[in-house]
Amino acid sequence: MRKAINGKIVTIDNVEIFQQAEKALLLNRVCTTNLSDPFILLNESQADKLKDLVSVYEALYTALPYPLYALDMPIKYATLGLLAKQIIDDIEIYVEDCSLAVVIDTDSDIAVQFINKSYKVIPFSTKEKKSLTDLSSYQNTKYYIYFDYCLNKFISPESESNVDFTDFYSLISSNILSACSDKKDIAAQLENILRVKSVPKRGYFKTNVILDTSNKREYILNFIKDGVSENDEPSGMKCISLVTGKVTNAVSKDVTQLWKLDCYVRENDDSKLKNSNRAGFYTLFYMLCSMREANKLDYFPDFKAIIVDGKLIVELDNIVYVAPSDKLGNLVPIAEGAELYSIDKNNIYLESADRTGKIKEKSIYCYNTRKGSLELCQTKYDI
């Protein structure tokens, strides 16, 4: 993905990691305490160790660069546990159910569980469990290269006094360091990385009206019955003559309603409609008739449409199409699962939405009528 940052074009090699991070931040999974959980009373030594562990974990969590700290996956907890072990040597760490468990007291089977920024004390038996000593078991895991870099950076001799993860961002983008002034600027840009291009405010598009954006004229399509067409077709049933006993195929009348199109235009908010005729509208008319017939509807499907730069842009049945506005042609799909969102000169903005589990993903795309190109502008997540 390419994005303009501080006047420079930056290439982001892995967009998915930012999408996963934003989803995880939105879900904000935490440790939960249930009434059925056993009450654990810590002695003074255990309480002191808990305090130290929490302090170290919080510092390490904050030190991890974005988007790594925001991800909610086992390799993150393994990395945080191994980093904590570099500071507090006499601890055993385990990763279970996408959380980090650090044993406080092996004799009493007590551990502290960490999930993102939350923690709680839990009963934890180490029997038949192997504590984590390195990241080797995660080598085939997605994003391993990023977490392994941070772990090695932390334990390197050069980082004894101060750990600087700035170089990490070159793994995300080869040229982002040259586009940003400092580490804070990098972090701010990355947290907004899914907003690739600014988007105008949502526009309003009338249903079953074609708006010519060049002169604000509104066109209304009027469907008029124009007789019927009858075809004799086999019905699939058999008829037996009571006189001759002969078996024949039954025939039914297939009746198709025919339609013709009248088009009217409203100018300058005048309520009076005037007859108008634009050849390109017949492309939409034929599509609507075809959909009505194919789906056995007793109505014409709703649509929204605009004319931009001589192009007819149509939102129909959750698909956005383009066709010539001044001549008969074909409705060519631009985007499926999309709807008209806004318009700015020759740029048509489309919105698509998809829900996976609790997360709803909304993406805005820009279609340029002159280039014929479709580009992602931004992606947002909601619950």
Image (cartoon, grey):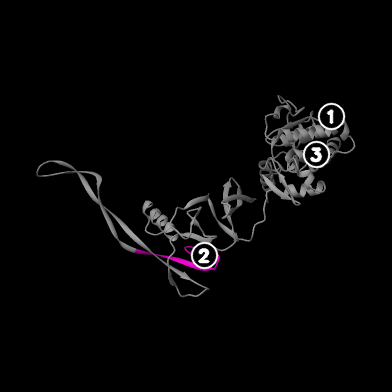
Identity of the amino acid at label 3?
A: Asp
Tell which circle, 2 or 3, labels the residue nearer the N-terminal end.
Answer: 3
User: Label for residue 167?
Assistant: 3
> Is 242 or 323 nearer to us in this picture?
323
Residue visible at 70% across and 29% down in the picture: 139
Q: Is residue 172 above or below residue 267?
A: above
- Counting from the top left corner in percent of width and height, residue 20 is at 66, 43
**Residue that carries the numbered disc 1 in the rendered image:** 90
Q: Which one is in front in this view, the residue at disc 3 or the one at disc 1?
A: 3
Q: Residue 356 appears in which quarter of the rendering?
A: top right
Extreme right residue here?
Answer: 161
- Distance between the Cα atoms at labels 3 and 1? 30 Å
- Distance between the Cα atoms at labels 2 and 3? 51 Å
- Counting from the top left corner in percent of width and height, residue 26 is at 67, 48
Extreme left residue here?
Answer: 243
Residue visible at 76% across and 50% down in the picture: 188
For the record, the magenta segment spans 206-224
As drawn, is 18 to the left or to the right of 103?
left
**Tag 2: Cα neighbours inside 10 Å, few (<14), some, or many (≥20)?**
many
The verdict on residue 223 being magenta is: yes
**Residue that carries the numbered disc 2 in the rendered image:** 211
Identity of the amino acid at label 1?
A: Asp
Residue visible at 67% across and 50% down in the picture: 196
**Tag 1: Cα neighbours inside 10 Å, few (<14), some, or many (≥20)?**
few
Q: Is residue 225 above or below residue 269?
A: above
- Answer yes or no: is residue 383 visible: no
- Counting from the top left corner in percent of width and height, residue 307 is at 52, 61
As drawn, is 32 to the left or to the right of 165?
left
> Is 127 or 276 nearer to us in this picture?
276
Q: Secondary structure at mark 2?
A: strand
- Answer yes or no: is residue 327 visible: yes
